[in-house]
């Protein structure tokens, strides 16, 4: 999803925000905030797709039916050069990407930056993925549309990254096993005991945080994790993520609203790049809390 090179620039906007599709920003929101998105790639056997072109329901079903798990790959520098080249000359670019400890996407973006020495491009590592990454991108884009300078947009993005919290529950460890992120024995024992892991990001790396036994305990635990970390619900921006698990996502949102009083919680379905690694029936929360002295666009 990109914008034409002759796109209109809103009065006062001084920065173009770019990200990759691992951010999982809903297309309508990306268009409204004028975010340019570089797609990552998904390989299923001999077939390679841009993840933004893949039907998510069909992808989830194929994962469940296939003995061969899908693989993901970062966009090459050429893809970033194409997007950066569409940005109006003289307009600084702030390019925010999936954790460099999970993907080579940021490296590709930085290689493209080095090939365009005449352009003002800042490449940032969000140390996150999915809408954890997406929250930083969204706030950067809102700041850009509010007329903030490139330095201010970067500071806003870093403030969100520093405060970001992300917790994901998985229905099974099978997909992490297939991707080589957990051992066969760990996955087998977890599945036999009906253990549902809860993961978080630790300095850009996906790491174990907690576990519950049985699906019925997932939502109460996720809500409790959020409750323990929120000081002022009015300052929290929160999204609920899922992979082919919309009914549970709606239940989680309802509980976050009821227990914590959170408002305007966005529900979104993670794309194929995320689903390929965690599998269907994943559920998570991503949120950050602004402090009283942190200006927001």
Image (tube, grey):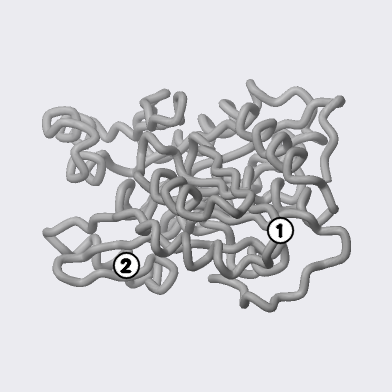
Question: Residue 59: which disc?
Answer: 2
Q: Residue at x 33, y 72 (%)?
A: 58
> How far from the left and from the top, in percent, is residue 118?
59, 54
In front here: 135 or 75? 75
Q: Residues within 10 Å of mark 2 (few under 14, many from 20)?
A: many
Q: Residue tagged by mark 1?
A: 91
Between 27 and 184, the residue placed more toward the observer is 27
Q: Residue at x 38, y 72 (%)?
A: 54
Q: Is residue 53 left or right of residue 221?
A: left
Find residue 157 and report its horizontal and vertical position in percent: 67, 39
Task: Locate residue 190: give its quadrant.
Answer: top left
Q: CA distance from mark 2 to mark 1?
A: 37 Å
- Given this view, does label 2 or label 1 mark the residue nearer the observer? 1
Q: Is residue 101 left or right of residue 163?
A: left
The label shown at residue 58 is none
Q: Name the residue: 35% across, 32% down.
A: 197
The 10 Å Cα crowd at callout 1, few under 14, some 14 to 19, many 20 or more, is some
Q: Is residue 184 left or right of residue 237?
A: left
Q: Position of residue 153 (x, y in %)?
A: 73, 43
Q: Secondary structure at mark 2?
A: helix
């Amino acid at each position: 999803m990109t914008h034409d090179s002759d796109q209109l620039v809103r009065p006062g906007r001084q920065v173009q925000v770019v990200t990759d599709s691992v951010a999982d920003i809903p297309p309508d929101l990306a268009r409204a905030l004028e975010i340019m998105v570089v797609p990552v790639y998904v390989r299923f056997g001999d077939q390679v797709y841009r993840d933004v072109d893949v039907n998510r329901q069909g992808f989830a079903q194929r994962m469940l039916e296939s003995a061969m798990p899908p693989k993901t790959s970062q966009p090459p520098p050429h893809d970033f050069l194409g997007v950066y080249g569409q940005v109006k000359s003289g307009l600084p670019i702030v390019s925010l990407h999936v954790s460099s400890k999970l993907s080579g996407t940021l490296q590709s973006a930085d290689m493209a930056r080095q090939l365009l020495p005449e352009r003002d491009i800042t490449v940032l590592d969000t140390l996150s993925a999915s809408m954890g990454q997406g929250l930083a991108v969204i706030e950067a884009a809102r700041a850009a549309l509010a007329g903030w300078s490139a330095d201010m947009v970067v500071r806003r993005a870093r403030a969100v990254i520093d405060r970001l919290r992300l917790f994901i529950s998985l229905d099974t460890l099978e997909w992490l096993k297939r991707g080589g992120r957990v051992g066969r024995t760990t996955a087998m024992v977890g599945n036999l005991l009906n253990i549902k892991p809860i993961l978080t990001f630790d300095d850009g790396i996906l790491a174990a945080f907690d576990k519950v036994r049985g699906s019925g305990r997932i939502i109460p635990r996720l809500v409790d994790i959020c409750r323990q970390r929120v000081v002022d619900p009015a300052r929290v921006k929160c999204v609920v993520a899922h992979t082919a698990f919309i009914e549970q996502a709606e239940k989680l949102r309802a509980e976050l609203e009821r227990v914590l009083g959170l408002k305007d919680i966005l529900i979104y379905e993670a794309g194929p790049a995320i689903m390929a690694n965690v599998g269907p029936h994943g559920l998570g929360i991503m949120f950050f809390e602004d402090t009283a002295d942190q200006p927001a666009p």
